[in-house]
Amino acid sequence: MTMHQFGYGKLDQPGVVQFLFHPRKEVDSKPPPGAIDYDIIVEEGIPIGARFYMAGAADPNILFFHGNGEIVSDYDSIGPMYNEHGLNLLAVDYRGYGRSGGVPTVSSMMRDAHVIFKEMQHWLQDAKHTGPLVIMGRSLGSACALELAASYQGDISGLIIESGFPHTVPLLNCLGIDTQALGITEADGLKNTQKIAQFAKPTLIMHAQYDQFIPVMSAEILNVQCAARSKEFRMVPGADHNTIMMRTGKWYFETIKRFTNKIEGKREKRSFRRKRTR
């Protein structure tokens, strides 16, 4: 089930795009030590900016699609924290964001996700990175992650969804979009529930208890619909849409690391205290 079977034209209306996307440009941002910038040509004359925060060649690789108000350089202090936990983070932008060219629309975002995924596969192979490939999407980025999960299950080892949404219309309404006036129904949406129902590989879903845009019930719906036998749902108490990492600190990265350890078949290390003998 891929975007080739769905049309997202109704979501490309100006009355949707202006609320759904909040692009901003990158201002002279150089990658931190250990990170590299990479441009992906998704269409003639339109590059998508990516920044790779790299740990080891055998470590898990996380292809990451961020939220609608973020750019990859926002992760310059976060990428190294992934690296400290033995994880490679490959963060990508959307059209009009960061160093990227073009203007964002829903159709181009979904189409570009396919090009980005295939380019990532080639880059990892050429760079001799042998770790498993995990797709991760946060908020708006969950749509891209689920699109790829439903399309390339055989090439993906796992899926991580943070602050994701199952249904499109409730999210658009929350953002102030009058879907009824624009003639948009759920049939015109991103089909996230249908896509996650096609994915049977290990899945981790994280969501804030007090998410003000996407209620925590949304994560529960995704979890129920997910076809994976190995799936985890982690609600973050006290957090809202933008404070999950702030609330959790190291727990956030440790949770992702435990998830990738399971994918790799690594057992969690445990410490045992010897019983005292009298």
Image (tube, grey):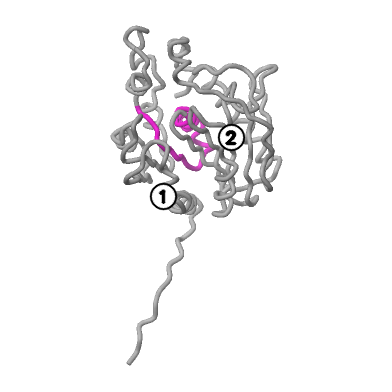
Assign the N terminus to one quadrant of the image: top left
Q: Where's residue 250, x and y in %?
A: 46, 53
State the separation of the CA atoms marked 2 and 1. 21 Å
Q: Residues within 10 Å of mark 1 (few under 14, many from 20)?
A: some
Please tell me which residue is depicted at 34% across the width and 12% down the height of the picture.
178
SS for callout 1: helix
Q: Where's residue 57, x and y in %?
A: 65, 50
Q: Where's residue 138, x and y in %?
A: 46, 35
Q: Earlier in the sequence, mark 2 or mark 1?
A: 2
Name the foreground residue: 262 vs 258. 258
- The amino acid beneath tag 2 is Val
Name the foreground residue: 222 vs 12. 12
Residue located farthest toward the left when viewing the structure as drawn: 217
Q: Is residue 220 left or right of residue 243?
A: left
Assign the C terminus to one quadrant of the image: bottom left
Q: Quadrant of residue 231?
A: top left
Please tell me which residue is depicted at 56% across the width and 37% down the height of the picture.
74
The disc placed on residue 90 is: none
The disc placed on residue 72 is: 2
SS for callout 2: helix
- The amino acid beneath tag 1 is Thr
Asked if disc 2 and disc 1 are in contact, CB closer than 8 Å, the reply is no
**Magenta region: which residues?**
141-166
The residue identified by callout 1 is 248
